[in-house]
Image (cartoon, rainbow, N blue to C red):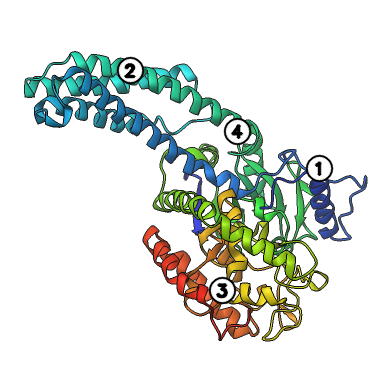
Amino acid sequence: MAAAAALRKASPATKPSLDAAGLQALAAEAVAAMPATAPDPDGAARRGPFRPEKLVSARARRSGVLTVGLFRRIDALALLGLAGLTAEASIVGPLMASPVGAVLPFAAAALIAGWALNGFDLYRFGRDELLSRRFARLAGAIALAGAGGALTAWLTGAAVSGLIAWSGLALAALLAAHAGWWSTVRRWRRTGKLTPNVLVVGATRHAERLIQSALERRDVNILGVFDDRLARAPRAIGGVPVLGTTDALLEHRITPYVDRIVVAVDPSAKTRVRELMQRLRVLPNEVTLLVDVEDDGRSAALARLADSALDGGATDDDRRAFAKRMQDVAIGTLALVLLSPLLAAIALAVRLDSAGPVFFRQRRHGFNNEAITVWKFRTMRHEAADAKAERQVTLGDERVTRVGRFLRRTSLDELPQLLNVIKGEMSLVGPRPHAIGMKTGEIESSRLVAEYAWRHRIKPGMTGWAAIKGSRGPLHTAAEVRRRVSLDVEYIERQSFWLDLYVMVMTLPCLLGDREAAR
């Protein structure tokens, strides 16, 4: 009996785009991960049929859903604004003093138009959608809104002449706006910003059929295959290279560019599936189990994945992410402007206190394990700088300058990270970004807690839930790492606009210094 194929969600879930040298390094790493039994005879880097010229980070592609929210809001403001202007022009006397019945038709038309734009899927932006068809649906939405406004006017005894003007202006505005939205989305698709990147676990017949379907559609990039049974696995499946084992995947440099990991193992092999899911759960990437038996269902699943960046059906997580980004941009920009005199004074103090640059830049983990460059005011002697945090700061650390001690006690050294927030690499509130390769004692911190990477399922923050709960500064023991990760995961599960505001307010007392923390 035929069953529908589906991609079943199994768990929730940058570095700038890679250049040619970066892609070559990734390819070399993939070849090095291959076993001796599967050499590359020509020695060439195996890119596969899906590898784009530039890999765009998952963080950059995730902005698509947020952009749809912005499109909606601009349209809503335009509809309401035009309703107010046409009502003002067609009603005798001040608008605010007009009877409700005279204003109600314009309000009804604007509200019906907003509902119709969503109902006609005008925020979906399908890959093959023609602009003419979008214009036709826009005209239908405005016609429906105009009819609803006219019916309201008839019921209230109001004139309909103003609604005719509103309909014409609203249609013209929406046609211009959606021509811009449509062109923007097409450009993003061409540059790969909206094309999901996928890794497949399991060099199986299911993976082969999935890759074949993706090759036919060309709207999903399958970058590589991983399989623990390398001795039996081919060098490539459908031209997609087999890059290594599951262990190689867990630490692979390509994961920040991956939107989803698909487990293409036969679901009837329950023990193997369970073991793979357990091992992959430590990654911040979304993991999906492929249940595959029917061509049509597989094609539909790929279509849903391809359109997931701009599908018009934003989830609660998407709406929270949009609100969080707007919060970051608004508050971050205002803070940068207001604090600019303080930033200049600190920069001068750092320069006068010791030789070396004013700023310290460090590579740290961002969203989805992306490597980002975080900015801080320099607090250590330049020659003693520790970019990898191999030796964490202790009380009375001789590497810290006089001005640096004050900046660390008050956390003022973190203020330049407002630039990271405005760029979208960080958020005002989130798990603190740790240096790549940071050690606790002699062991890399990420190896001390299995769920360590879960803290990368959201952008890192300038402050966070862990910081106001006392987990601030260096981590010297495994117990401190576990507590930090536990608090970070708790924040990710509870994150909301109001919780972020609470954390920001509660962070202010910390600027006065935490005498118990060595920073």
Looking at the picture, does residue 292 appear above or below residue 72? below
Q: What's under tag 2, amino acid-wise?
A: Leu
Q: What's under tag 4, amino acid-wise?
A: Arg
State the CA–CA distance, disc 1 to disc 3. Answer: 42 Å
Q: Earlier in the sequence, mark 3 or mark 2?
A: 2
Q: Secondary structure at mark 3?
A: helix
Q: Tag on residue 189?
A: 4
463 left or right, relative to 22: left
Give coordinates of residue 456: x percent, y percent.
58, 62
Q: What's under tag 3, amino acid-wise?
A: Thr
Give coordinates of residue 479: x percent, y percent.
59, 85
Q: Nearer the viewer, mark 1 or mark 3?
A: 3
Q: Nearer the viewer, mark 2 or mark 1?
A: 2
Q: Secondary structure at mark 1?
A: helix
* Residue designated by label 2: 169
Viewer can see residue 277 = no
Q: Earlier in the sequence, mark 4 or mark 1?
A: 1
State the residue at coordinates (81%, 50%).
27
State the CA–CA distance, disc 4 to disc 1. Answer: 20 Å
User: Are the two marked residues, 3 and 2, in contact with CB atoms closer than 8 angstroms?
Assistant: no
